[in-house]
Image (spheres, rainbow, N blue to C red):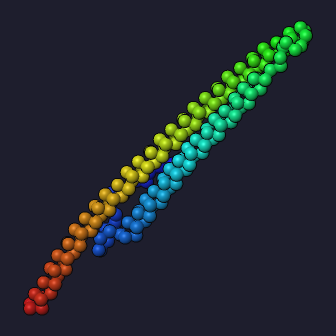
C-alpha cells in the first residue's frame, strides 16, 4: 500500500480563481489512488474467498479419508478361522493397524485444525485489511469533498470580488469621460 499523498494547503491563484490544471491534476491523482485502494480491497476479498474454498475442500477430503479408514477397519479377518500361530500374528497385525490408524487420525485432525486456523487467520487479516483500505478511501474521499467545498466557496468569494471590481471599473469610466 502506498503512503497517502499530502494534500496541498491551497492551489495557486490565477486571474479568475484557482489554477484549473492544478485542481484537475490533484483530483486525477486522488481518483487514481481511490481506484488502487479499491483494487487492493477486491484482491483481499478474493484471497479470503479462495482460502475459504480451499478450507472446504480440505474438510471434504478429510471426511472422505475418515470414511475410507473406517470402512477398512470394519472388515478384519476372523481369528477363529485360523490356527493359534496365525491368530497371534493376526492379533499383532490388528494392534499395529489400530496404532497406525490412530496416529493417522491424530495427524489428519492436527492438519485440519492447522489448515482451519490458518484459513481463519488469513480471512480475518484480509477482512481487516479490506476494512482499513475502505476506511482510508472513505476518509480520503471526505477530505477531497471538503477541499472541493472550500475551493468552491473561495471561488465564489473571488468571483464576488471580481464582480465588485468590474462594477467599480464600469462606474469609474463615465467619471473619467466627464472630467
Residue 77: quarter of image: top right
Asked whether, in this view, residue 156 is left or right of residue 82, the answer is left
Residue visible at 33% across and 59% down in the picture:
145
Q: Is residue 22 above or below residue 47?
A: below
58 to the left or right of 84? left
Looking at the picture, how far across and down is residue 19, in whole percent? 35, 69
- 125 left or right of 11 in image: right
Residue 90 lies, with reference to residue 69, above or below; the image says: above
- Outermost residue, top side: 84
Whole-percent x, y for residue 109 in the image? 65, 26
Q: Is residue 40 visible?
A: no
- Residue drawn 46% across the image and 48% down it: 133
Q: Nearer the viewer, residue 144 or 155?
A: 144
- Indicate the quadrant where residue 106 lies: top right
The residue drawn where x is 43% and y is 59% is 30
Which quarter of the rendering shows the C terminus? bottom left
Which image quadrant is residue 167 in? bottom left
Please state the horizontal and vertical placement of residue 3, each as a whole percent of the image.
47, 49
Residue closest to the eye, 174 or 179: 174
Point out residue 85 in the picture as x, y percentages from the top left corner: 90, 9
Q: Is residue 27 visible?
A: yes
Q: Nearer the viewer, residue 170 or 4?
A: 4
Q: How many marks?
A: 0
Residue at 52%, 52% (x, y): give it.
42
Task: Indicate left or right for 151 with 45 as reference.
Answer: left
Amino acid at each position: 500500500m502506498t503512503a497517502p499523498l499530502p494534500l496541498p494547503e491551497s492551489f495557486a491563484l490565477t486571474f479568475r480563481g484557482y489554477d484549473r490544471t492544478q485542481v484537475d491534476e490533484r483530483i486525477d491523482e486522488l481518483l487514481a489512488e481511490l481506484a488502487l485502494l479499491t483494487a487492493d480491497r477486491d484482491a483481499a476479498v478474493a484471497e479470503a474467498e479462495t482460502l475459504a474454498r480451499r478450507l472446504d475442500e480440505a474438510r471434504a477430503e478429510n471426511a472422505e479419508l475418515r470414511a475410507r479408514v473406517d470402512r477398512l477397519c470394519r472388515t478384519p479377518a476372523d481369528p477363529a478361522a485360523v490356527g493359534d500361530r496365525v491368530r497371534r500374528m493376526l492379533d499383532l497385525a490388528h494392534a499395529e493397524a489400530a496404532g497406525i490408524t490412530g496416529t493417522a487420525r491424530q495427524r489428519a485432525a492436527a492438519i485440519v485444525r492447522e489448515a482451519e486456523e490458518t484459513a481463519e487467520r488469513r480471512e480475518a487479516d484480509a477482512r481487516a485489511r479490506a476494512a482499513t483500505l475502505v476506511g482510508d478511501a472513505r476518509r480520503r474521499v471526505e477530505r477531497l469533498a471538503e477541499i472541493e467545498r472550500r475551493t468552491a466557496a473561495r471561488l465564489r468569494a473571488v468571483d464576488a470580488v471580481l464582480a465588485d471590481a468590474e462594477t467599480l471599473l464600469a462606474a469609474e469610466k463615465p467619471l473619467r469621460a466627464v472630467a
